[in-house]
């Protein structure tokens, strides 16, 4: 589902300027011009435009990153998983290839297209990627707020420290935030560009 309900994809280049990951309790993106990571902290606000699924990771054999196409429905759409230097790794419905992908170093990732203020006062297109515990927290939040998510903004109000075995990690804390009709219209316009 998308905010503007557009479902056709023209195949144009991705219009997002920012590709943001949750790492070590903080949102981070890589600034190509400065050649450095930019830390946005653990308090951001965004409007969800669309949600897709992909695979990311590291392929030891080729010493390169793993990536796949983005799909809307992992139960019916084929995922084509590749390594940047290693070529094709797996292809198929996610449930059929997930064990192979994990064995090769890939992880399931929620690729969310959002509108947010990153560098200034204007809403911009960004891609927010969540995996692991952060994705589990998002999935629970999304399921509890499914009806409101595309009419509101999502605010990350901080992070919560967790521990599983010997592993310490942080998860984002999500909350809904009301937005003006004007802000929603801007988000819909950005989603039309995205779609």
Image: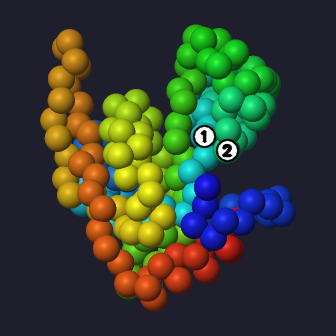
User: SS of the residue at dot 1?
Assistant: strand
Image coords of residue 6 (percent x, y): 71, 66
Look at 20% across and 46% down and name the residue there.
159
For the N terminus, give its image quadrant.
bottom right
Vertical position of residue 40 compared to residue 64: above or below: below
Q: Quadrant of residue 95?
A: top right
Furthest residue to the right?
10
Q: Count residues near mark 2 (Cα–Cα under 10 Å), then give few for <14, some for 14-19, many for 20+.
A: some
For the residues labelled 1 and 2, say whether their Cβ atoms are less than 8 Å apart.
Answer: yes
Image coords of residue 185 (percent x, y): 53, 83
Q: Count residues near mark 1 (Cα–Cα under 10 Å), then give few for <14, some for 14-19, many for 20+.
A: many
Look at 23% across and 37% down and name the residue there.
170
Dot 1 corresponds to which residue?
Answer: 53
For the C terminus, give its image quadrant.
bottom right
Q: Quadrant of residue 94?
A: top right
Label drawn at residue 146 = none
Look at 67% across and 38% down and name the residue there.
73
User: SS of the residue at dot 2?
Assistant: loop
| Mark 1–mark 2 distance (CA, rounded to whole Å) | 6 Å
Image coords of residue 104 (percent x, y): 61, 15
Look at 79% across and 60% down and name the residue there.
9
Coloring scheme used? rainbow
Label drawn at residue 72 = 2
Q: Earlier in the sequence, mark 1 or mark 2?
A: 1
Furthest residue to the bottom?
182
Q: Give left or right: position of 136 versus 64.
A: left
Vertical position of residue 94 compared to residue 41: above or below: above
- In this orientation, which residue lies closer to the viewer: 1 or 106? 1
Query: Is residue 77 something one can see in this rendering?
Result: yes
Query: Is residue 85 something one can see in this rendering?
Result: no
Image coords of residue 177 (percent x, y): 29, 68
**How many numbered dots are placed on residues in this image?**
2
């Amino acid at each position: 589902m998308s905010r503007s309900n557009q479902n056709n994809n023209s195949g144009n280049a991705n219009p997002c300027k920012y590709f943001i990951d949750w790492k070590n309790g903080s949102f981070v993106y890589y600034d190509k011009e400065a050649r450095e990571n930019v830390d946005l902290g653990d308090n951001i606000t965004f409007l969800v435009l669309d949600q897709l699924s992909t695979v990311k990771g590291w392929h030891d054999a080729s010493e390169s990153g793993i990536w796949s196409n983005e799909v809307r429905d992992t139960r019916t759409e084929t995922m084509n998983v590749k390594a940047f230097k290693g070529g094709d790794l797996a292809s198929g419905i996610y449930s059929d290839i997930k064990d192979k992908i994990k064995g090769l170093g890939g992880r399931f990732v929620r690729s969310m297209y959002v509108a947010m203020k990153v560098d200034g006062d204007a809403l911009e297109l960004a891609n927010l990627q969540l995996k692991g515990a952060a994705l589990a927290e998002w999935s629970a939040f999304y399921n509890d707020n499914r009806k409101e998510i595309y009419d509101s903004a999502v605010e990350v109000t901080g992070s919560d420290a967790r521990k599983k075995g010997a592993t310490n990690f942080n998860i984002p804390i999500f909350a809904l935030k009301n937005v003006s009709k004007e802000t929603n219209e801007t988000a819909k316009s950005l989603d039309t560009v995205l779609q």
